[in-house]
Amino acid sequence: MKNALGQPQSLLLLGGSSEIGLATARRLVRARTRRVHLAGRPSPALSAAAEELTALGAQVSVHDFDAEAVETHETVLGKVFADGDIDVVLLAFGVLGDQRRDEQDPIAAAAVARVNYVGAVTSGLVCAQALRRQGHGSLVVLSSVAGERARSANFIYGSSKAGLDAFAQGLGDSLQGSGVQVMVVRPGFVRGRMTEGLTEAPMATTPDAVADAIMAGLRRGSETVWVPGALRVVMSGLRHLPRPVFRRLGV
């Protein structure tokens, strides 16, 4: 449960080595979150994340979690919630894919959809049901502005994020009155491992800036967070452009 100051005491990070997820975890631990569950595929990065958060003062547990192995989600995540209430769940896993390759390889394209959308649906539902039983908690879902309107340059990734975004919004509506908050986070281009080597888009941001926005959104009880905030206005305009005009933008 949250402490007397309303600060979360426990975190479940799905995508335990995510740059945005870890930036958020650091902030939560510094704000006195004491239990952290890192869920992800075993890797040196996941082990390093556990060591770092332990050094900051958290009690850290690592769980073997594969977003594509949807049949395991109920068991793996059920064990996490059996260990005690969770105040914040941060769904931060995802893959960008390679648009040019994936257009020619439907199986590779399907893998992007399985991770970004299908895996998020199963794990999101498992966590939402557990949070509902608790009667409290926040589910933070990392979406993307790429889901606001499909672009020819990344429509496979964008469509998976569009599905995730719609799912999270509907899930949040279904949990009204339960004590559970669902917050959808829509960053723009984030400088990091996933986008290394790509041409930077306008209004690019960083994992730390996204983490700051997540923390502010949790304090406010927000349902939607844009990073940077000005993207809300930009994407509202782009979303309503006629398709022939949108195509000419070359984005």
Image (cartoon, grey):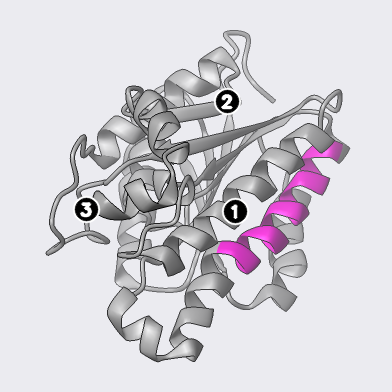
Residue 15 position, x and y percent, is: 47, 58
Q: Which residue is mark 2?
A: 8
* Residue lying at 13% horizontally and 57% vertically, measured from the top left: 199
Q: Nearer the viewer, residue 79 or 147?
A: 147
Residue position for label 3: 192
**Which amino acid is tagged 2?**
Pro
* Quadrant of the image occupied by residue 11: top right
Q: Reading the chain from its start, which is encountered first: label 1 or label 3? A: 1
Percent from the top left, x then y, of residue 140? 57, 38
Range of residues picked out in magenta: 117-132
Q: Is residue 28 something that shows in the picture?
A: no
The structure residue drawn at horizontal position 41% and vertical position 39%, both measured from the top left corner, is 241
Question: Element under label 2?
Answer: loop
Spatial separation of the CA atoms under disc 2 and disc 3: 27 Å
The residue under label 1 is: 164
Residue located 27% across and 35% down the image:
208
Residue contact between numbered discs 2 and 3, judged by CB atoms under 8 Å: no
